[in-house]
């Protein structure tokens, strides 16, 4: 996976997991990464945001550990 996409997904994940006073700051960080990545890829931030929303659940499943089997 592209390192920039991976960093954007991690930033999105951190934003989604944030709560309380930390949430607005995490949103700002994500939006900043999103704007930079959109500029680098020469696409609109909204189009990239939609792609992240689609890719995020797939990324989460791919990065989750499988449950252990009982012995």
Image: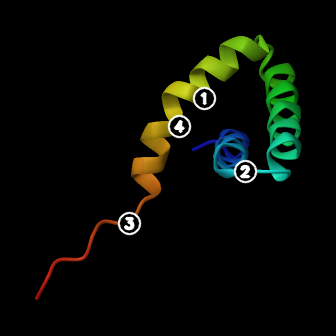
Q: Which residue is mark 4?
A: 56
Residue at the spot 42% in from the left edge and 60% down from the top edge: 64
Secondary structure beneath disc 1? helix
Separation of disc 3 and disc 4 at Cα?
16 Å
Secondary structure beneath disc 4? helix
Tell us which disc is closer to us: 3 or 2: 2
x then y, percent, for residue 67: 27, 69
Residue at the spot 51% in from the left edge and 32% down from the top edge: 55
Residue at the spot 85% in from the left edge and 40% down from the top edge: 24
Dot placed on the residue nearer the N-terminal end, 1 or 3: 1
Tell us which disc is closer to us: 2 or 1: 2
Q: Which residue is mark 3?
A: 65
Quadrant for residue 50, please give it.
Answer: top right
**Name of the residue lying farthest toward the left:** 71
Residue at the spot 60% in from the left edge and 29% down from the top edge: 52
Q: Which residue is mark 1?
A: 52
Secondary structure beneath disc 2? loop
Q: Which residue is mark 2?
A: 19
Dot placed on the residue nearer the N-terminal end, 3 or 2: 2
Dot placed on the residue nearer the N-terminal end, 2 or 4: 2
Separation of disc 2 and disc 4 at Cα?
19 Å
Dot placed on the residue nearer the N-terminal end, 3 or 4: 4
Do the CB atoms of the residues marked 1 and 4 lie less than 8 Å apart? Answer: yes
Left/right of residue 34 with respect to residue 28 in the rendered view:
left
Tell me: residue 62, above or below residue 34: below
Neighbour tally class for label 1: few under 14, some 14-19, many 20 plus, Cα within 10 Å: some
Separation of disc 3 and disc 2 at Cα?
24 Å
């Amino acid at each position: 996976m592209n390192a920039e996409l991976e960093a954007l997904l991690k930033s999105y994940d951190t934003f989604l997991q944030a709560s309380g006073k930390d949430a607005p700051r995490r949103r700002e960080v994500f939006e900043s990464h999103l704007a930079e990545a959109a500029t680098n890829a020469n696409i609109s931030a909204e189009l990239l945001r939609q792609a992240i929303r689609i890719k995020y659940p797939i990324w989460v499943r791919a990065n989750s550990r499988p449950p252990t089997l009982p012995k």
